[in-house]
Image: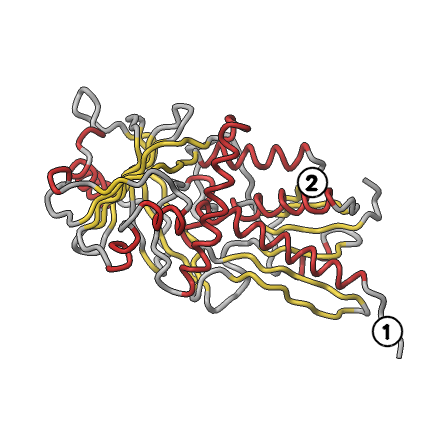
Amino acid sequence: MAKDSKKIVVIGAGVIGLSSALLIQESLSLKKENYEIIIAAHEFPHPHTTKTSVNYASMWAGAHLRPIPASTPQLEREASWFRKTAAKFRSQFPQEPWLGILPLRGVEYLAVPSEAYQNLVRSEDTFTKETALENLRVLNEKELPDGVALGFEYDTFCVNAPVYCMALLRKFLVRGGKTINRNLKSEWEAFSLESNVRLVVNASGMGFGDSKSFPTRGQICLVSNPFDKTITRQHKDGTWSFVIPRCFDGGTVIGGTKDVNDWNSEPSLATREELFRKAVETFPEIKNSAGRIDIITDVVGRRPTRVDGMRIEAEVRQEGGETRSVVHAYGAGGRGYELSWGIAGDVAELVGRELREQSKPVSRL
């Protein structure tokens, strides 16, 4: 592409940035608009899956789709993104099996189910309409572990996160995308990365100095023990346990913690032991024939969380007689994979709108 071609920079190579960059490529290609799309990030997907980074949560996430009732305005917005993502995964799996998407049964065990959860599973039609997940079955009392008041299962998807991120990046590059390795300090700095940058997408995770953003520390353990379903359990003390298998012999994720505003980057042995204890209590079959759980690596990640949820909006500034537009797309917390394609669709739509505004003739009156 020509050196002076119009450019769009996407900041961040997490699942939101990668998905958004791909949909922007698709959207502009369909409209036959000639833009070069660039992903600028400090870290990119790579094949060294045991070399983790605390600030690059997407590469080592557990990544499964599990239903959450749309009981607040924020959760209603997220439910719409969730349904679009579930539909996308359903189409991607047969068409692109190399992406690392695994269809399987999901199981929920809730010790203290909210009224919203109880309403969600009252009928299969209600459940599927709200979540886009299919084949709900509510478990009977004999099927529930001790201390569980409500259990149900459904068809869902797990994602082998490192495989998936690398596959999305590869697709982006094959379509003519470009990458720049840079640790940006501001979303506006991205306009100076290359000439003729017309728009920036801020998918940086935490944003840049947004007072509403904060990290939620998560600790998980990747083990070699295989598993054939994803199970999530709510405990009476408010903590959660989960097991998430990965396809392509990628092991199984046992988790997890949600530690708000905890910046500690080191895994805790005591936390790992507690994760294993709760896992064995709920799904004892996770142990292998020798009665062991074989560890591949501990993982600590900072989930980029935000008060009021995702920020998706355009911000426009006039600098040096030029209009500079930033489309913000950050703050998904631990739901990046679950919401990714829905968010990316909104981002691509906003990008298109801002580019149309830029193309309007400027009044000289």
Helix, strand or loop for disc 1: loop
Q: x%, y% of residue 133?
A: 39, 42
Q: x%, y% of residue 363?
A: 86, 73
Q: Is residue 91 left or right of residue 153?
A: right
Helix, strand or loop for disc 2: strand
Q: Residue at x 39, y 23 (%)?
A: 249
Q: x%, y% of residue 68?
A: 34, 52
Q: Is residue 231 left or right of residue 26?
A: left
Q: In this view of the protein, can residue 267 be seen by the observer?
A: yes
Judging by the rendered image, the residue that carries numbered circle 2 is 178
Q: In this view of the protein, can residue 221 be seen by the observer?
A: no
Crowd class of label 2 (few under 14; some 14 to 19; many from 20; radius 10 Å)? some
Q: Is residue 5 left or right of residue 333?
A: right
**Type of the residue with mark 2:** Lys
Looking at the image, tell me whether mark 2 or mark 1 is earlier in sequence order: 2
Judging by the rendered image, the residue that carries numbered circle 1 is 363
Q: Nearer the viewer, residue 332 or 320?
A: 332
Q: Residue at x 79, y 45 (%)?
A: 34
Q: Work out which quarter of the rendered image holds the N terminus and state it.
A: top right
**Type of the residue with mark 1:** Ser
Compared with 165, 319 (above or below) is below
